[in-house]
Image: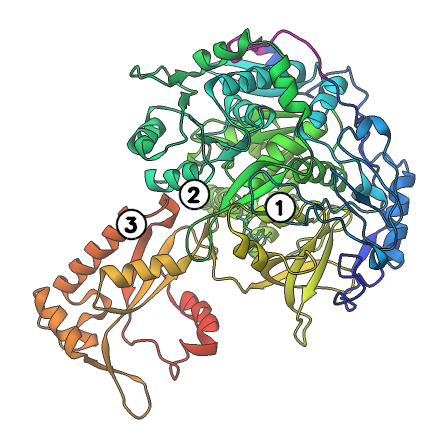
Amino acid sequence: MEIQKAPLEGGTWDKDIRRVGQLTPMLTGSTPRVGGITMQHVVTACEPTSMSEAVVMEPSQAGGFLESPCGAQHSAASLDDGTVDTANESSEEESTGEKEEAIVTLDAVTISTKATEVPAEHSANTQHVKAKRPDSLSVPAAEPRLWTSQRDAEVKLRIGDSGVAAETPLTVNQMFTSVVERFGDCTALSWKEGEQQKSLNYKDYYQSCRTAAKSFLKLGLQRYHGVGILGFNSAEWFIADIGAILAGGFAVGIYTTNSPEACQYVAENSKANVIVVENHKQLQKILQIEDKLPHLKAIIQYKDALKEKRPNLYSWAEFMALGRDEPDAPLDAVISSQKPNQCCTLIYTSGTTGQPKGVMLSHDNITWTALSTGIHVHLTEAREVVVSYLPLSHIAAQMMDIWVTMRVGGATHFAQPDALKGSLVNTLKEVRPTAFMGVPRVWEKMQEKMKSVGAKSSTVRRKVAAWAKDLVFKKVRKALGLDRCSKCYTGAAPITKDTLEFFLSLDIPLYELYGMSESTGPHTISRPEAFKLTSCGKEIPGCKTKLHTTDEEGNGEICFWGRHVFMGYLNMPDKTEEALDAEGWLHSGDLGKHDKNGFLFITGRIKELIITAGGENIPPVPIEDAVKEALPLVSNAMLIGDKKKFLSMLLTIKCQTNAETGDPEDELTAEGQELCRKLGSNATRVSQVAGGRDRAVHAAIQEGINQVNERATSNAQRIQKWQVLERDFSIGGGELGEWERKSREEKKASITWL
Ligand SMILES: Nc1ncnc2c1ncn2[C@@H]1O[C@H](COP(=O)(O)OP(=O)(O)OP(=O)(O)O)[C@@H](O)[C@H]1O
């Protein structure tokens, strides 16, 4: 059954607001059930458990590893067991008619055009007031807006009037305690230490987070101040993240390959009181900048023994010991003062120009998106197992590994730090996850590996391999550790059709996931019953898409609406207003179109952003400017790297231009010739320099590139290859002006070594 969705309103109730009539996405007929997680706020009083007290599993127990996180204790109540949930039926109903959006504030007023009453026990911080029609509403002066850029402010939540969009907002603590109540004995986290398997169940995990929260408070963590976390995925990473949130701070993941300066920016911007580092190497980065961090009070190292003693430097065990005997009351007071519409997490995302932006995510952003995503992809309660290996400073990994998995009582197993250097498949084979997410580069690597194994074998065996592909899917899946994984996802960057087809030919459909940090991760996800190759699928329930200023082919800027839309950029009201329009739609900067069945296809990008195959977002302009500044001989610098493994750069040299046509000529400008002479070169023409023909110029350019690379924010932002072109860019040549974008694509395609 497919239900036609009615033309969408602009997302708010204001009648004067621009309408978005053209969009008519379809919803599939499958009716997901709203996850049965109880909403009570339960604080269980148990003895805190430290990481060192984690349960040690016998190897035999670990055998096929986690058969299910919760053994037989739970009856695997599927979120998609065919039960038709009335709440969600009405969600589809709402899609068929003119939709009135309800907006709820969590302090003074709740405006609900179809007033959904919330049970009193779920709304400690919420007063519901039946709303008048918005156009006759007099809005109280202190009412929060949809967005903010202040660390301590509250926002209006975009609560719908039925279905998932109307679910009661929860804080992270409320969600976690309800999970503990239902799945307390289920495995939450597991990892390997040497040959030993270790794990924590939900009860102990929660208690460890509380202990960490008490320790943070003891170290002086202030409300709405950051706890920076810099290191590879581990139980300590999660506990520090959630501990920071429970203690009223912000959890702030820092990209592990960030330079000290880039770490400094994040620590300063988030006013980090504490930084949690993985090991000595990461510690060194923070020690280099600690004098420049006035808010920093303590550093914690969570792996390996400390190599030096310093005041305010703690091992993980020392850190957890700080909070272990602390009373509950102060922490409980902080927890009960938290509201779902307040910020709890910052995700730093590359600005296309200037400094990274701190994406403020509220408790509701996180708890609601986890719920909606779990429903959309049909996760099974107390049964899911995932492997955590993607960088946790990104929302995609946080959402999948921490929040969605928690929401359904699943287990997260931590991969080894060298996962991406080769150990991932071994971990997958041991753990046999039920859901797995890879950025395109991960899938490409698997594809390359499988192809190279095929290439090495003899012709006969190769033929057998090609033939066998159709018959031995199970074996292939097993060899990849994906034999019980029915949900394989790709996201964060565009993936090639070739890779999608390769895996499909092995009976491994890759479901595409599309979203942004600003949408708390997923906006659309494809899934078995709504799958089209190269489409990113359809919206997670309760979210809407509009395509802004469409062209004749239906391509427009993809805009999002829903409870997953972020609060704003920290301290950047202007940037926030650029990202969110007057109606509150989040403008993605991506181009897309819908097919007649409502499948979303990403067709391009308006924003000047390179997204590598590894999913790293890289703003090209600051890097290009830095190269031009370091190398006065260079007239144009163009960074290439979209969908590529690494960054490359195309350079042009300052040359004369034809006064009549404006076309570039071969002769260097006087300045260019002078600069060459200073470098020890006699070159007077571009053709003498291009393609690495002039050693002195070549060496000087390499030197300049090295200087820029030294200042790079992270490894991913380093220029690995470069080339001087035979001709400068020009409008006539098609590289500049309105063709610049197209030209980028063409140039990219013509360079074979990329
Ligand atoms: N499936 C996809 N296909 C094409 N582009 C994508 C896809 N998913 C994300 N992107 C690109 O990535 C951008 C968002 O990057 P951003 O870093 O904010 O979030 P993310 O990639 O979802 O999360 P992460 O923080 O993990 O990188 C999108 O605006 C889009 O350009």
The disc label shown at residue 53, or none:
none
* 613 to 679, vertically: above or below: above
Secondary element at image label 3: helix
Front residue of 339 and 704: 339
- Number of marks in picture: 3
Residue where numbered disc 3 is placed: 709
Q: Nearer the viewer, mark 2 or mark 3?
A: 3
Mark 1 closeness class: few <14, some 14–19, many ≥20 residues within 10 Å: many
Query: Is 339 displayed left or right of 54 in the figure?
Result: right
Q: Nearer the viewer, mark 1 or mark 2?
A: 1
Query: Is 688 displayed left or right of 416 in the figure?
Result: left
Q: CA distance from mark 1 to mark 2?
A: 52 Å
Magenta residues span 43-59
Front residue of 553 and 421: 553
Q: Nearer the viewer, mark 3 or mark 1?
A: 1
Residue 684, position in %: x, y?
13, 77
Magenta-colored stretch includes residue 52 = yes
Residue where numbered disc 2 is placed: 456
Mark 2 closeness class: few <14, some 14–19, many ≥20 residues within 10 Å: few
The disc label shown at residue 567, or none:
1
Q: Does residue 53 appear anywhere in the picture?
A: yes
